[in-house]
Image (tube, rainbow, N blue to C red):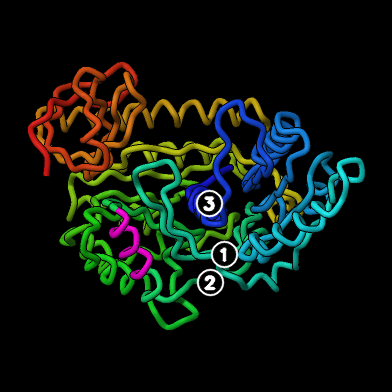
Amino acid sequence: MGCKLNFAETSTFARMLQEMGVRTAEKGEQADICLINTCSVTEVADHKCRQAIHRMVRNHPGAFVVVTGCYAQLSPQRVSAIEGVDLVLGSNEKADLIQFLSEAWAEREGLSVEQRAPLHRHHTVPTKDITSFAPSCARGNRTRYFLKVQDGCDYFCTYCTIPYARGFSRSPSIDSLVAQARQAAAEGGREIVLTGVNIGHFGAKTGETFIDLVRALDQVEGISRFRISSLEPDLISDDLIAFCASSRAFMPHFHIPLQSGSDTVLRLMHRRYDTALFAQKIHRIKTLMPDAFIGVDVMVGTRGETPECFEETYQLLNTLDVTQLHVFPYSERPGTAALKIPYVVDEATKKQRSQRLLALSDEKTLAFYRRHIGTEAEVLFERAERGRAMHGFTRNYIRVELPPAQAREEYDNQLIHVRLTGLNHDGTAKVEVRGER
């Protein structure tokens, strides 16, 4: 459930289980083990996680059910009490998931069928004691690999529970990450997405830096593309932007959380930048990489976001040369400092503000795509089911579609030279194939 970091971790868990002889259940087949890696970024996320757990228990009666992830860390007792749940592992314990699973499985297997009942066990530690780092570099059923380079966060923004769910910032060594990237290349990987909670904070406690990591990964042979999943504005150095602009493998694609375009709200959030710094980073990227795709996270309806503050956000984003907005309505989280802010935005207003920003996002994304119609590009295509269209992304993250009549199995995980010819009704780009590399 949730973010790319969770996807990377879940894919790694799956591979570890497969190496022990466990296989993925086929569609319609009863599973012996169900693993749910949860998210807790909003109350909606919590609700979806509970639904997923109930659905797993219902669809796979008698299966051994393991729940981990952010929701499991924040609400271990509530999760372990759900009917059918055997084992709940917090953020520190999931690094030893296989050991916990093996021990609990052996205990349950020693019981007769009549004696078996959900164990309802949970293992968590307080936030300050979350110190483990579970390495993850996997692609699951996708073409691109996701490499976990950092975990946890020291920022403690007033609206956010993630530091409580994942602990303080920590990261492995550059050498270990380069080794994982080389292994991905040896397995045929062509593209790697760097994931984490606050990846720009990489190495802050080990003496290494994020730009050192980027430079080292850029030298990994066999990997044609790297993407950076998300970077805090205050951690994007001009040196990093300049390096990405001239690098061999780092793509002109950035995802930068703004959260609010109002300095008043940013101060209430305890964010570590202002709108002037954010705008400066966007301008710098676009100066060196005019065709760069820039995605921006925006939260609407936070406590303290008056109508005037929202208009400041809208006007800022309207003037900036960004490509796409990821809009999230504010969700109240128990225990966060934001609950002390007196001004509350009602749900109807949140929805209205979200719709305005989503409409602005559609305009910006469409304009970005249209600017590239008629140009040529390299696309890394992803495997498609027989009879379905193939999809892939250009270097600057334009999503393209190749109709079933033109799709070929040999295009999967290959860099194909194409010409962008138009737009489909779903917003993807039409292409004609020029060749492959």
Residue 160 pos. (x, y %): 63, 53
| Residue 111 visible here | yes
Q: Earlier in the sequence, mark 3 or mark 2?
A: 3
Q: Residue 18: which numbered mark, if any? A: 3
Residue 186 falls inside the magenta stretch:
yes
Question: Looking at the image, do the residues carrying marks 3 and 1 touch, with CB atoms under 8 Å apart?
Answer: no
Q: Earlier in the sequence, mark 3 or mark 1?
A: 3
Is residue 79 shown above or below 90?
above
Q: Give me the residue at 70% from left, 35% from top.
A: 56
Q: Nearer the viewer, residue 168 or 365?
A: 168
Span colored in magenta: 178-187
Disc 2 is placed on an element classified as loop
Residue 254 falls inside the magenta stretch:
no
Dominant secondary structure, magenta: helix
| Residue 266 visible here | no
Residue extending farthest bottom: 207
Residue 254 pos. (x, y %): 33, 51
Mark 1 burial class by Cα count in 10 Å: few <14, some 14-19, many 20+ = many
Query: Mark 2 is on which residue type?
Result: Arg
Mark 2 burial class by Cα count in 10 Å: few <14, some 14-19, many 20+ = many
Q: CA distance from mark 1 to mark 2?
A: 6 Å
Judge from the rendering whether residue 15 lies leftward or rightward of residue 348; answer left or right: left
Q: Give me the residue at 62% from left, 30% from top.
A: 29
Q: Residue 170: which numbered mark, if any? A: 2
Which residue position is annotated with label 1? 152
Q: Nearer the viewer, residue 163 or 79?
A: 79
Q: Nearer the viewer, mark 3 or mark 1?
A: 3
Query: Mark 1 is on which residue type?
Result: Gly
Q: CA distance from mark 3 to mark 2?
A: 28 Å
Q: Nearer the viewer, residue 358 or 307?
A: 358
Q: Earlier in the sequence, mark 1 or mark 2?
A: 1
Residue 152 pos. (x, y %): 57, 64
